Image (cartoon, rainbow, N blue to C red):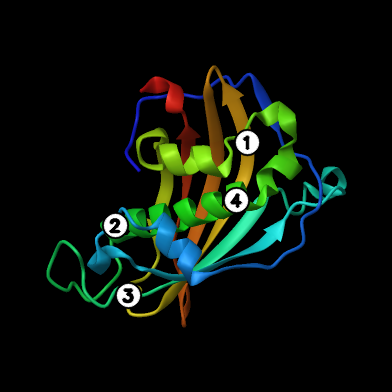
Amino acid sequence: MITTSLQCDRPDDIIVAGNEKAAPIQICDRFAADILKPYRAHARYLKAAEITHCRDESAADAAANDPALVVGSGRFSIPESCYIDDTGHFNAVEFNICYNQLAYVLFGKCAEAGILHRILGPKANLPSFAEFMQHQLPSMLIVRIDDVRFFKQMKSGDFRAELRIEKFAKKGGALFFFTSITFSDCEGMKAQGSVVLAFSPTIH
């Protein structure tokens, strides 16, 4: 994903309610590998992923306690950095790469299984799986990264992340997804941040 100046300060519509889809949903290795083909082999840090939660139809009542539309988790390992000598810990560049890989795989699975389509409904006008794959690299864009914090050094050999799709908005021809992510190792949470994504094939 690349950063962009595309903005969503006044979305035309925000959708937060929807229907139930059973979870957890395992994402097979072959599916993840297909999504991550654009990455060089030594830079594919995501080793496994699953969707752990999808909002159900009682979300309007539960929103205050659990506002996420979809929650996914991933297991990572960085045996060797793809761009620098070993620093011995997880850093900001790796935060971004790992976020990108988990987001690509989760959004790809949501598109393939129709999960967000069922939650948000036809009004959202979400891309099909074929459209997602066609536009994955040029049209899935990071609009903003906020509140990134590193609490303690994290061992990069084996760690996990939880990515939450909190809400969805539309503005013009772009679709915006407001997400958050946390990274943890065996000692607990070590980093977190919030990311706004846009899917906008019309800007090219």
Q: Earlier in the sequence, mark 1 or mark 3?
A: 3
Q: Amino acid at mark 3?
A: Ser
Quadrant placement of the C terminus: top left
- The correct choice, above or below, for 179 with respect to 144 in the image is below
Q: Residue 95 at x, y = what percent?
A: 35, 58
Instruction: Tell which tag, 3 or 2, sits nearer the viewer.
Output: 2
Q: Are marks 1 and 4 in contact (CB under 8 Å)?
A: no
Name the residue beneath numbered marker 2.
Answer: 39
Name the residue beneath numbered marker 1.
Answer: 168
Which type of secondary structure does the marked residue at label 4 adopt?
helix
Q: Are marks 1 and 3 in contact (CB under 8 Å)?
A: no
Instruction: Tell which tag, 2 or 4, sits nearer the viewer.
Output: 4
Quarter assignment of residue 40:
bottom left
Residue 152: assigned label: none
CA distance for labels 2 and 4:
20 Å
Name the residue beneath numbered marker 4.
Answer: 112
Quarter assignment of residue 73:
bottom right
Q: Amino acid at mark 2?
A: Tyr
Q: Residue 7 at x, y = what percent?
A: 45, 24
- The correct choice, above or below, for 174 with respect to 188 in the image is above
Quadrant placement of the N terminus: top left
Q: Amino acid at mark 4?
A: Glu
Foreground residue among 203 and 171:
203
Name the residue beneath numbered marker 3.
Answer: 156
Which type of secondary structure does the marked residue at label 1 adopt?
strand
Q: Residues within 10 Å of mark 2 (few under 14, many from 20)?
A: few
Q: Amino acid at mark 1?
A: Phe
